Image (cartoon, grey):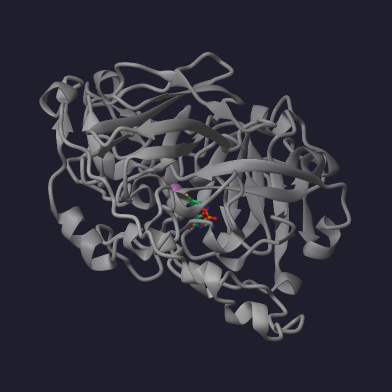
Amino acid sequence: MGDLSKQPGHLRPAPENFLSDEQVKAVAAGRRDFLRKSFLAAGAAMAAPIAARASDGDPEILNLPPWSTSLGMPVAVNPYGQPSKFEGQLLRRESPGLTRVGGASVSFAPLQGLFGIITPSGLHFERHHQGWHDVDPARHRLMINGSDPAFLKKPKVYTMDQLMRLPSVSRIHFIECGANTGLEWGNVAVPTVQYTHGMLSCSEFTGVPLKLLLEDCGVDYKKARYVLAEGADGSSMTRTIPMEMVENGEVFVAYGMNGEMLRPENGYPLRLVVPGVQGVSWVKWLRRIEVGDKPYATKDEAVHYIDLMPDGLHRQYSSIQECKSVITTPSGGQRLLEKGFYNITGLAWSGRGKITRVDVSVDGGINWKTARIEGPVQNKALTRFNIDWVWDGKPAMLQSRAIDETGYVQPAYGQLREVRGTKSIYHNNAIQSWKVVESGEVSNVQVL
Ligand SMILES: Nc1nc2c(c(=O)[nH]1)N[C@H]1C(S)=C(S)[C@@H](COP(=O)(O)O)O[C@H]1N2
Ligand SMILES: [Mo]
């Protein structure tokens, strides 16, 4: 059998299947390939490489390894468990293409190495406009007030202890930064799915519905139609949320993430969860909620997170993350080691509800097959899909296309650009293409 890391399908843990930071820089410096659907005609009829196989006995079968012949470690050597040392490559990473300004930066989740739909808390992407703090929960407060006393009768200040006594909900939701896949609008070849789509994570969050708190404070829903959420960090992160999203019970203030308290980077001890809405509205270190009768037009909604449209006008308040999907394996920077069977796997999500179908193409969108969806499918959560593929060793173009319960179909780049133009930064939900060449190398291209 030889070296297990050379076995087909063993894509994930082999170090050679991760780009080094140097390689990432080199690729990011280059230009992308733009391809039309007819690309396949050019690349047909290439010989498939056959990987050599060891015919001798496998020493890993013939000899007992140390873990079969010695005492194991006792319990609680790691009182807080850590991943295997063999998984040390799977980390959140900063993009070489983005500059860190003080604490204002972003780290991307390594989607290529994750299974199922839950992002491990230590790999959840991070986006801080002004760095993160480990906030003392004993000193943290949540204030709820109205911009006019008529909107909310009894303004209140809650401590964490008070919040955690209230009825709680636990729900699985995705969070995606509005700028996720943003570099793909431009002519930059972002090399891996970690950098193209890694401002995306999914967790089980636990907390108190905001509706319950507002009603505790005597909100008047007829007058108070908007909510302003404010964070305790130095970024003056403030976002307006329409009251309908609160009234339907979906928005909640969360202290829990994946069964434990939130991580400091993700807003410990309290953050807002706004299912389906772009990450920026999920205010971290949440310290204040104000209710009002109109949108607040704060900097992070009036100036940032807006979309420059082809007619030269900006589209504002487009905060719902539209239906989107991506193949996470095989994906850019990975390498298929020989022809044969592969499980194509990926993620689909929609800010408008549940995913109903995901189609996969291996020929750049000419033919599509429906993938297997791993249920139960959750509302506004990542949804895992899988599909069988036998690679014939010839060039291929892998794509996925998601459909949500509203019937919306994820667009191709050409379709998205027709409506949105080319000058956007945010809200790119186009179909992602991964090109596979005869050597097995997988890279990021755009099929229009
Ligand atoms: N207080 C505060 N909340 C914030 C931010 C911030 O900088 N400060 N960043 C926002 C942005 S732009 C995103 S995408 C998400 C990222 O959440 P995460 O770091 O938990 O992934 O938090 C949002 N909430
Ligand atoms: Mo964001």
Q: Nearer the viewer, residue 132 or 218?
A: 132
Q: Which residue is drawn at 77% across and 58% down?
A: 157
The correct choice, above or below, for 29 with respect to 242 in the image is: below
Q: Which of 415 and 270 is in front in this view?
A: 415
User: Residue 392: x, y in percent?
Assistant: 30, 32
The correct choice, above or below, for 385 with respect to 100 in the image is: above
308 left or right of 170 in image: left
Q: Which of 402 and 165 is in front in this view?
A: 402
| Residue farthest toward the top in the current orientation of the protein | 407
Can residue 147 be seen?
no
User: Residue 27: x, y in percent?
Assistant: 19, 55
Q: Residue at x 57, y 57 (%)?
A: 231
Name which quarter of the figure residue 103 lies in: bottom left
Quarter of the image containing the N terminus?
bottom left
Q: Residue at x 68, y 58 (%)?
A: 270
Can residue 233 be seen?
yes
Q: Nearer the viewer, residue 410 or 287?
A: 410
User: Residue 322: x, y in percent?
Assistant: 47, 28
Q: Residue at x 22, y 38 (%)?
A: 48
Quarter of the image containing the C terminus?
top left
